[in-house]
Amino acid sequence: MQKATLWILGLVIIIGGWYLWTQRGTSAPSENTDVFAQETADADIGVQAGNASPAVPSASSNANVPATVITFTDAGFNPSSITIKKGQTVRWMNNSGSKVWPASAVHPQHSAYPQKSASDCLGSSFDACRALSQGESWDFTFTYVGNWKFHDHLHSSNTGVVNVTE
């Protein structure tokens, strides 16, 4: 009787394990998965929200077209210095053969720009939080007046400045 019970228990464990293994991909997503899924969905549809969320170009028109585009080429940021009004958006566009990660000065903390939120990946909201591949872009809306230096987190010698006026 004891051998039969052990066999049944072993069989239940094996079947239960198999069931759990096959159900991994269909279980309800966790909170972290939901955040990742939303960020992925946002990037897939080209969200250009003007916050710290990375974004990719979209074929559809965007009502909030950025005031200025800074292009990253193999030679660096172009232009490397711009002046905009408070509340305007800047788009960093990667047209180089390598990846670029636009972020606030100072490398590597990215803490010079004062806007901060719980979702920041490093020191401030002025941070793409990931490398942009060729053809990808990232938007950021400046809400503070000042001279805000930025750099490529992957190659910190590539720098620039956004001068924000009233």
Image (tube, rainbow, N blue to C red):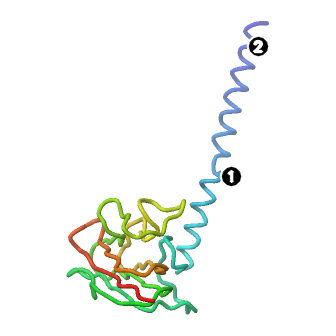
The residue type indicated by label 2 comes to: Thr
x, y percentage for residue 97?
27, 77
Cα separation between marks 2 and 1: 32 Å
In the drawing, does residue 166 fall left or right of residue 12?
Answer: left
x, y percentage for residue 46?
53, 80
In the drawing, does residue 26 fall left or right of residue 43?
Answer: right
Look at the picture and state if 13 lies above or below 72.
above
**Disc 1 marks which residue?**
26
Farthest-out residue, right: 1
Residue 102 disc label: none
x, y percentage for residue 76?
23, 80
Look at the picture and state if 164 lies above or below 126.
below
In the drawing, does residue 148 fall left or right of residue 50?
Answer: left
x, y percentage for residue 15?
70, 32
Choose mark 2 or mark 1, whichever is in front: 1
Which residue occupies 32% across, 69% down? 105
Secondary structure state at the residue bearing disc 2 = helix
**Disc 2 marks which residue?**
5
Which residue occupies 66% across, 53% down? 29
Quarter of the picture holding the C terminus: bottom left
Farthest-out residue, top: 1
Q: How many marks?
A: 2
